Image (cartoon, rainbow, N blue to C red):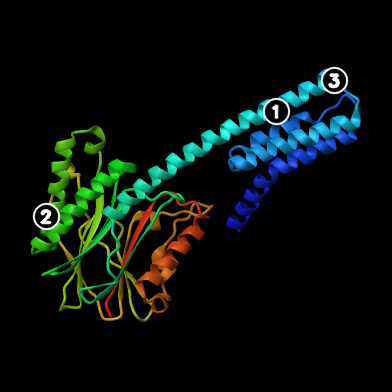
């Protein structure tokens, strides 16, 4: 319903220049001599400037000028000076509208170029994982809060290692290129540590040290105040279990083949990465059964903190209960989740979200 209203509003705005010209002609025709519809004709090209192409803007100004000229020829009620003043006003405003259109188009081109660069950076930092890694079926998805924006602080990665398939999903505090820089640091450290470290706890400590080095190197207030929530997962190749280390991140969900859903909260809650000065203690991995046919879902708080019009949060555990058996393919699961969150929040998500689903065949 919301999308339909937006579509109607866009159509109306696109028709507004033509409606203004029609309204000006009608006003001029039905009102006595001395009243003029020139303001309507003046407004039409100005409204067209940010909406139409250069050709459309020029055409709108020409039509407005032509209609006004025809009306003045037919009416003959105004003096020559008044007619010339009205025509000159519409002509000058039309020229200004053309200049505005040129500036808007150039600005749009620069914005599109910047967006392409941001998207390239995002794809370089967050490449799509393969559909099958280490015998598991995997899908990942990044959903930007604003349509057309694709750069932020949510992250994910998958690494096959001698110790099993290791995964990370996290959320860096902040937005923009600074957040993407922190994402690059975390993911770079993760890919190296996932291959080298024998335990998931050691991987978490490597990430902590990498962020600490980056903080000392940059030495900025925004860096000192930053932190990163992450959940690390390890799926051994032989055992039907999943090991998790959670650093202040939303709890993963385990979707069973019978349709039931189970949350996997941390036994001992821990602070996010980058907050060691507030307290530090050894990381401890939790272990849970991960049977055949089950799917592990990891996500950022853009999913669980999406609100509807009345302020209610989206609850993925409740939303997926009883449906997990119908959403066995990871990519299909993430597609349904993304659509439901958009619908729940009325298309206006407040935060980006990263989703990752791993299914044990």
Q: Position of residue 269 (x, y in %)?
A: 22, 56
Q: Are marks 2 and 3 in contact (CB under 8 Å)?
A: no
Q: Residue at x 68, y 48 (%)?
A: 12
**Disc 3: which residue:** 80
Q: Residue at x 44, y 54 (%)?
A: 306
Which one is nearer the viewer's eye here, 175 or 80? 80
Q: Position of residue 121 (x, y in %)?
A: 30, 49
N-terminal of the two: label 2 or label 1?
1
Q: What is the secondary structure assignment of the residue under circle 2?
A: loop
Within-10-Å neighbours for mark 1: few <14, some 14–19, many 20+:
some
Query: Marks 3 and 1, Cα distance to the nearest angstrom?
Result: 16 Å
Numbered circle sitting on residue 282? 2
Query: Marks 2 and 1, Cα distance to the nearest angstrom?
Result: 74 Å
Q: Are marks 3 and 1 in contact (CB under 8 Å)?
A: no
Q: Is residue 9 left or right of residue 235?
A: right
Q: Is residue 64 left or right of residue 288?
A: right
Quadrant in which the N terminus is drawn: bottom right
Determine if residue 248 is in view.
Answer: no
Q: What is the secondary structure assignment of the residue under circle 3?
A: helix
Q: Position of residue 179 (x, y in %)?
A: 29, 44
Which one is nearer the viewer's eye here, 96 or 171? 96
Is residue 132 positioned above or below 141 on the image?
below
Numbered circle sitting on residue 243? none
Quadrant in which the C terminus is drawn: bottom left
**Disc 1: which residue:** 91
Q: Nearer the viewer, mark 2 or mark 3?
A: 3
Q: Residue at x 10, y 58 (%)?
A: 202
Q: Residue at x 43, y 51 (%)?
A: 145
N-terminal of the two: label 3 or label 1?
3
């Amino acid at each position: 319903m919301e999308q339909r209203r937006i579509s109607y509003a866009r159509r109306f705005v696109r028709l507004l220049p033509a409606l203004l010209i029609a309204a000006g002609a009608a006003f001029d025709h039905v009102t006595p001599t001395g009243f003029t519809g020139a303001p309507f004709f003046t407004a039409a090209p100005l409204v067209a400037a940010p909406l139409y192409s250069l050709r459309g803007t020029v055409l709108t100004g020409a039509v407005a000028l032509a209609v006004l000229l025809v009306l003045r020829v037919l009416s003959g009620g105004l003096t020559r000076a008044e007619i010339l003043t009205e025509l000159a006003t519409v002509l000058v405003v039309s020229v200004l509208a053309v200049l505005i259109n040129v500036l808007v188009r150039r600005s749009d081109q620069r914005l599109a170029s910047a967006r392409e660069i941001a998207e390239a950076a995002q794809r370089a930092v967050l490449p799509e994982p393969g559909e099958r890694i280490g015998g598991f079926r995997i899908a990942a998805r990044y959903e930007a809060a604003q349509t057309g924006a694709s750069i932020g602080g949510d992250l994910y990665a998958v690494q096959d290692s001698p110790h099993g398939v290791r995964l990370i999903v996290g959320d860096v505090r902040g937005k923009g290129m600074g957040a993407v820089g922190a994402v690059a640091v975390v993911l770079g450290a993760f890919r190296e540590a996932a291959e080298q470290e024998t335990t998931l706890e050691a991987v978490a400590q490597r990430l902590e040290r990498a962020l600490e080095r980056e903080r000392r190197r940059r030495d900025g207030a925004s860096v000192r105040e930053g932190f990163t929530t992450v959940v690390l997962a390890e799926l051994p190749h032989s055992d039907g279990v999943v090991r998790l280390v959670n650093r202040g991140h939303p709890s993963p969900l385990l979707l069973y083949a019978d349709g039931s859903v189970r949350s996997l909260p941390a036994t001992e809650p821990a602070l996010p990465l980058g907050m060691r000065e507030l307290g530090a203690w050894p990381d401890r991995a939790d272990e849970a059964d991960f049977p055949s046919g089950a799917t592990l879902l990891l996500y950022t708080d853009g999913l669980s903190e999406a609100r509807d019009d009345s302020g209610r949060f989206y609850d993925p555990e409740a939303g997926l209960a009883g449906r997990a058996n119908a959403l066995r393919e990871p990519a299909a699961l993430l597609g349904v989740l993304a659509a439901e969150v958009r619908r729940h929040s009325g298309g206006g998500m407040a935060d980006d979200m990263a989703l990752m689903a791993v299914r044990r065949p």
